[in-house]
Image: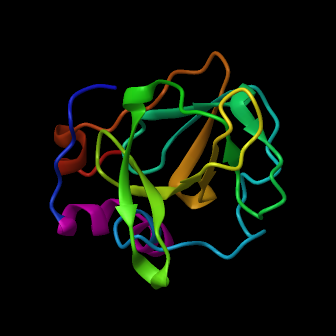
Amino acid sequence: MTGKLHLSEEEWRKRLTPEEYRVLRQHGTEPPGSGCLLTTKEPGAYVCAACGNPLFKSGQKFESGTGWPSFTQPIEPEAVTEYEDRSYGVVRTEVRCARCDSHLGHVFPDGPPPTGLRYCINSVAMKHVPEGEPVPLVTEEASQSGRK
């Protein structure tokens, strides 16, 4: 992870699609089974759709049957942050990108070995970068000039 990325909500609105903004910045959720990355199996990394921060490796992805891409662990422990989420009358653990603080999904203690965790992540919150390709990190300068 490169340094923290701090953009105004106006900047986020300009650079994200309406659906990306709803999920990443307003803590939304895509409907189960609707995400474009649900069945992706190609080797590579999954990066934050907002800032390009590497989040998960394809080798940690598994089919959970929940309707969202699921992973056993992040690419590095520092790639994500976790927060208590008490919305909808239940207590869950929210997962955010550690670089830009965007909402990714939730983590649950019902995953497979070796971690026993299930990082249940919205497809719209990530982009798949095929193995061997460079990760396109967003910088504050690139965002201000209108580039991704």
- Quarter occupied by the N terminus: top left
How many numbered callouts? Answer: 0
Q: Is residue 55 above or below residue 105?
A: above
| Residue at x-position 83% and y-position 50% | 39
Image location of residue 68, percent across then percent down:
71, 59
Task: Pick whichever, 67 or 137, lies toward us.
Answer: 67
**Residue 73 horizontal side relative to residue 16, left or right:** right
Residue occupying the point 79% across, 32% down: 42
Relative to 19, does residue 16 appear above or below in the rendering? above
The answer to which image quadrant residue 117 occupies is top right
Residue at (68% x, 38% y) in the render: 116
Compared with 76, 55 (above or below) is below
Q: Please identify the quarter of the rendering in which residue 40 is found.
A: top right
Answer left or right for 116 relative to 83. Answer: right
Q: Nearer the viewer, residue 80 or 141?
A: 80
Is residue 114 rendered magenta in the image? Answer: no
- The quadrant of the picture occupied by the C terminus is top left
Magenta residues (range): 9-22
Which residue reaches farthest top? Answer: 132
User: Left of 104 or right of it: where is 65?
Assistant: right
